[in-house]
Image: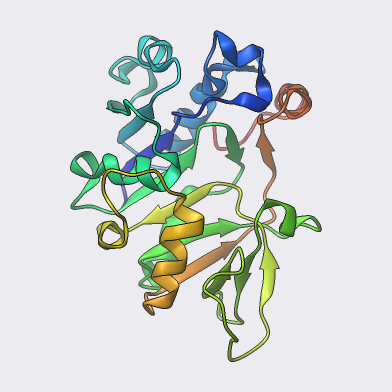
Amino acid sequence: MITRAMVLAAGFGRRLAPLTNTRPKPLMSVAGRPMLAHILAFLRAGGIEDVVINLHHLGERIEEMVGDGGAFGLRVRYSKEPVIRDTGGGIKQAEPLLDGEPFVVANGDSLLDVSLPDVIAFHRAHGSVATMVVRPDAAAARYGLVELDADDRLRRIVGLPPGGTSGPLRPYMFPGLQILEPRVFAYMDAGCAFSVTRVTYPRLIAAGEPVFGYVSDARWITIDTPEALAEADRELRRTPFRST
């Protein structure tokens, strides 16, 4: 069982400005609770016990709200970024807190109503070094196309690595939930900012590492714009997530 996770919570949330001028995006209220509280509840319900949260923009507000994680039934530690590292760089900086065990990674601004134990079981069964949860979406290319083969193996992401494939690929989008093995750190450069999807995953694919996509049409909410935040609030008030 995987019991460790990381929540990516360092971003500026510029598309939510001016709301994020004084409150970090993961603390935006959704159905009466900070978004981060919903995410931590999801992780705890999925069997997670230890969480690392990376911090940069207004990170002290997040640390004040979450504390040591005890109020959420978790043990929480923090990876503070003096300079923001993007998703991949943030995960790499947290390596000392994560290395040695596989871990779940969740975005701090979105939530997917999926069974985390089912995703973990898929990851284990496929011997995957990295597993992305992916969703069918007519606008998948707008989010950054994730392409799987007939066996759910990830063969290309955002057009990378370039070159042909041995068969037809199926297009999906990535809603921000993934599982990584410690071996992934070998494909990450230290001390710099980079995207895990645009840099690390193409490296893994090019190296022939087993990388898979867990296909799900589960309900997904995100709060990356004022309109999305308002819709997320309405949606969770109407129908709370079963996993939280």
Residue at horizontal 35%, vertical 66%?
A: 129
Query: Quadrant where the C terminus lies?
Result: top right
Observer able to see residue 45: yes
Residue 216 placement: quadrant: bottom right
| Residue at x 44%, y 73% (from the top left corner) | 205
Provide residue 128's location: percent of width, then percent of height.
38, 69
* Residue in the image at 49% along x and 29% along y: 11
Q: Position of residue 190 (x, y in %)?
A: 26, 48
140 vs 71: above or below: below
Q: Looking at the image, what colour scheme do you see?
A: rainbow
Compared to residue 138, the image places residue 87 above or below, namely above
Left or right: residue 86 versus residue 240 is: left
Residue 234 drawn at (x, y percent): 78, 23
Image vertical order of residue 222 relative to residue 156, above or below: above
| Nearer to me, 87 or 83 | 83
* 143 vs 218, nearest the viewer: 143
Residue shown at 53% from the left, 49% from the top: 115
> Which of the 4 image quadrants contains residue 67?
top left
